[in-house]
Image: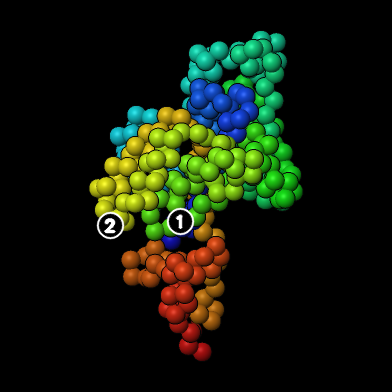
Amino acid sequence: PTAPYHIAANTAWLDVNLQHKPMDDVEFRKALAYAIDVDDIVSRDYNDMVQAANPTGLLPIWDKYVDDAVVTKLGISYDPVKAKSVLAAAGYKDVDNDGFVENKDGSKIALKIIVPNGWSDWMAAIQMISKSAKAVGINIVPDYPDFNGYLDARLKGTFDLAIDNQQQVSNTPWSYYHFIFYDDLKNIATTQGGNYGRYNNQAAFDLVTQLDKCKADDLAGMKAIISKLQTIQLTDLPIIPLWYNGMWAQMNSTYWTNWPSSAAKDNHYLPVTWNGYWNMTAVLMLTSLKPVTP
């Protein structure tokens, strides 16, 4: 009944290509994270139909797995003053007075951020990201290849920055961390299972394996492992969570009623049928519908 109206289906995050300078520098990644005004994207691009992501990127259904102490200590939110100070402390300076910082060796920084052409909400989002990044001295230019070009760049690691939301809601956060810390780096040329930025950290990979072996009902065990993963993620920033993409759905009560809603008296089944949601209560949603009496 109130904004954001849609259930959070996945996390839209910023893929950062760690093979390209200066994204291989964690301090630059931190400055970039401080520079992005996610609330502006939520309010002006989405008209509050979505929510800004927790710094961990964990979906709201996984709130119980968020280690608040880790987030308080390491989490990053929009702070352009902090972004500028982090850049300066790390040695990124505007050498030629063009308004943009250069690399530590004096070379130009000119990054592209990509989303598929025609994805209008994401196209608007990267324009906002570009604007807020430029305000702190980071030169990022929006680019809109067709979907196949976007996909090719993401899989082959030829991009600088990209918006991505591949990993969907599931029964545990293991799938989320498996995607972020996907460790099949022997196939780095065309990785398809996640970790498009090619982050390499064996300790994180081993923790994801431990999480896979942890029973789903062992909440304490899962939280202990996930806390360590969150510490690594928020320290190294292999990705930058931005907002929760909506589980887009529209219902019409002209002929059928008893659609899902968050109201306590209503059913809470998932009202969508794409990306496997048939298996995550969408079938039950259909069985609960009631015809309108003529």
Q: Provide residue 161's location: percent of width, then percent of height.
A: 62, 36
Residue sitting at 31 percent across and 48 percent down? 222
Residue 65 appears left or right of 163: left
| 170 or 273: nearer the viewer | 170
Residue sitting at 54 percent across and 68 percent down? 273
Please name the residue that numbered disc 1 is placed on.
169
Q: Amino acid at mark 1?
A: Val
Residue 25 appears left or right of 59: right
Disc 1/disc 2 C-alpha distance (Å): 17 Å
- Residue 125 is at least partly visible in this image: no
Q: How many marks?
A: 2
Front of the two marks 1 and 2: 2
Disc sitting over residue 48 in the figure: none
Please name the residue that numbered disc 2 is placed on.
217
User: Which quarter of the figure has residue 157?
Assistant: top right
Q: Provide residue 231's location: percent of width, then percent of height.
A: 37, 33
Secondary structure at badge 1 equals: loop
